[in-house]
Image (cartoon, grey):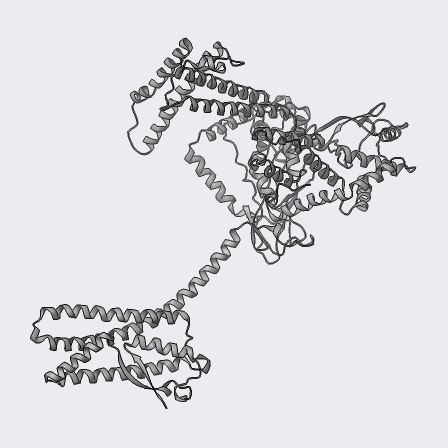
Amino acid sequence: MKDKKLELGVSGEKMVENREKYVGNKENGIYVSTMRTKEKQEEKKVGKRMKRIVESEEESSSSEKTKKSLKKSKKMNKKENIKTIECDSEYFNTGNENLYREKPTFTLDQNMINNYEKNKSMTKEMVNSIREKKSKKILKSKQSNNLKNETSENIEIKKEIDEKSIKTEKKLKKKHKSQEKELNSEELKNEESLRSKEEEEDYKWWEQQQGDGTIKWKTLEHNGVLFPPPYEPLPSYVKMKYKGEPISLPPEAEEVAGFFGAILSSEQYVKNPTFQKNFFHDFQETCKKTNAPVIPEKFEYCDFTPMFEYFEKKKEEKKNKSKEEKKKIKEEKDALEEKYKYCFLDGRKEKVGNFRIEPPGLFRGRGDHPKTGKLKTRVVPEQVIINIGKDSVIPSPPPGHNWKEVRHDNTVTWLATWNENVNNNVKYVFLSAGSSLKGQSDLKKYEKARELKLYIDNIRKQYRKELEDKLMEVRQRATAMYLIDLFALRAGNEKGEDEADTVGCCSLRYEHISLSPPNTVVFDFLGKDSIRYYNEVQVDPQVFKNLKIFKRSPKTEGDMLFDRLNTSKLNNHLTSLMPGLSAKVFRTHNASYTMSEQLKNTPKDASISDKVLAYNRANRMVAILCNHQRTISKTHSAQMERIEDKILALKYQKIRLRKAILTLDPKLEKSRPDLSEAVSDIDEDWIKEHQKVLIEKEYDKIKRKFQKDNEKLISQNETPMPESRLEKFLEKINEMKEEFKIENEKGRVESKTRGITIEKLDLQIKKINERIHQMKALMIDKDQNKTTALGTSKINYIDPRLTYAWCAKYGVNIERVFTKTLREKFAWAASTTADWEF
């Protein structure tokens, strides 16, 4: 065996070296347990050696021995108390089997090695600090005792080093264990935070691989539907009158009477004979069913005014509630609805759309609906079917009730369904418009319409050829396809006798079209939702000829125009031309194509307002194509007047700014004639009236602020401001009056702004001109769209990628043309680039 010199000092440094040897010999299979045994033996040897040094120094009394020990101690100090000892080189040999164990107690990692390195430096610092403390004591002592003190100092240092090193080693072991625990806990926390972060992030389904469209979900969890609260009877003093006398009604009948009483101000319903007839019939039936003491026989004798007045009073009370009260009511409502707002679809949190069951009321309907005014009865859980995952917890129905059925159908996307009683329509609870399932459906719809571009030329060639076919069925089908393609007519379905008389292309009757040679056709019928479709168009001569044949006698009013065609036959034929093609795909394609072509008319160098105006004009062309009409709003005239007043007010501001410029520099009147020119629509009389309005507004503003500030002070238990303070605030009104007087008499406007210059005033005039231009564009837009509903085509027919691409191309913020709801619904289209084309 060969001996090897190892430099060892404190146990911390020695352990690090042993660890390094272990790491170096790891391949030879030396375990950490071996290292621990060796470390203990090393500690014993160092302890014995230090003891011998101390004893030898104490026994030496001669000066020579003292000097030698002093030299040794100085040498030790220079080497930071490190001695050279001999160590058997085979001490760490792998052949020493007695030091082996079957399993290692722990594994050595880089963190532990780093900790021992830190301990090494800490030990050195500890030696230095102890030496400094002892050296201060030595300086105070006499020179004769220097040798003894230095010797004793070395002894104390050695003892303290041994004690400190043992304590440090124990601390390191404890620290290592605690670090392991911390690392494990941190890993768990990181995993949890990552998991929660992933859940919170928006699920970008359009970036994921899509399925085949059959299986919609794997797991589905939700909390069912929210039913409306039960009816609360009216106070005893609120009763409807019959023949001038108040009558008592059971709660069920009183609720129905209240439905009519609440809408007395809506003349379009309460004065509609059909609405009155349907309501009164259902009201009588409810009275009979509940054994009401008085069953009204004639509608004319019914007076619902007391109910109406009570409801209006409650509305006013609700409106006048404080901000805090309204906030509290909203918080309570949100807390009640919170659990219904979201579901978990395949483990992802998704927002639910219409989770509320519609409350009972009176059916309105659109247009001249034959069932308008009929009673919509209260929906109970026994009518509702719940659709949920097999392994999910089934939501509990209200106490005392059961669900009609619970299904686990993962091929559909609805969460709940029921049938309403008026039209027996099926109602569904779906995910929100911005959910992944809705988004996937929208994307597929627009991609299908986009795919039609590849087939449309061949389809048009074929149906134009078939317009002259010998078979009448083929000729009718080709004519219907022509009308659907060019005029975006709906296919149309047959209706029952008790349903609204709305028609589409296939269900057009003899009286719905008029022919005027050579090729003019006038369409006049009720379309979807009883909206009138009136359109006078020029058609292909062969189409005109065919329509004339289809109207040939013996056909008369009430007879079907396309008597050999129905929607099923038409859609079957369309599917044979292109997979998934239907009449609705034609509408979506034509709407998006029209929008795409119209958006090309956007002026590139125009202002943002003009670009938005061009966008809305393109949108209006699509709405007209799809017959998305609306009745003129009652408030339309008032809205237009308000916009006009705002424009005039801006023009008056411009006049005052011009006068302010001339007040600063009167010489500009000759060089800048624009500062003195008259402004259209504004004269002196209008200016004086407008000044009065401005003074009144400022007075109301000051008074409201004073009252609001006092209310705040009272709520904080502070003394409110006295009325004298208000009078001081109102001095501003007198200042305004004086300013207007000087302006009207002398034409001078003194600017109160410090450091005002002509350049700054010109800049303000420029900004006002821009605002006037924006207001005029808004006014034109509102007037042109008064009978057109732009929203429907945006939501259902125009590919949203066209809008995002247009915004990117012309530098328009998407918020100018898409509401927040639309931005959430079409989030999948937000990354569309400016060069995208339909």
Q: Which residue: 27% across, 74% down?
A: 165
Most foreground residue, 43 or 602: 602
Most foreground residue, 225 or 520: 520
Q: Is residue 831 left or right of residue 489?
A: left
Is residue 723 visible in the rendered image? The answer is yes
**Which of the image's four quarters has the C terminus?**
top right
**Which of the image's four quarters has the N terminus?**
bottom left
Residue 614 in the image, given as x and y percentages of width and height: 63, 30
Q: Which residue: 44% across, 38% down?
A: 328
> Can you say whether 774 is above or below 230 in the image?
above
Q: Quadrant of residue 109?
A: bottom left
Q: Which residue: 71% across, 37% down?
A: 593
Residue 58 in the image, given as x and y percentages of width and height: 14, 83
Residue lying furthest bottom: 1
> Can you say whether 162 is above or below 611 in the image?
below
Is residue 159 visible in the rendered image? The answer is no
> Can you say whether 170 is above or below 424 in the image?
below
Disc count in the image? 0
Residue 623 in the image, given as x and y percentages of width and height: 68, 31
Q: Quadrant of residue 300?
A: top right
Q: Is residue 439 left or right of residue 107?
A: right
Most foreground residue, 491 or 410: 491
Residue 757 in the image, given as x and y percentages of width and height: 40, 22
Q: Which residue: 49% across, 12% down?
A: 686
Most foreground residue, 663 or 794: 663
> Can you say whether 389 is above or below 115 in the image?
above
Residue lying furthest front: 671
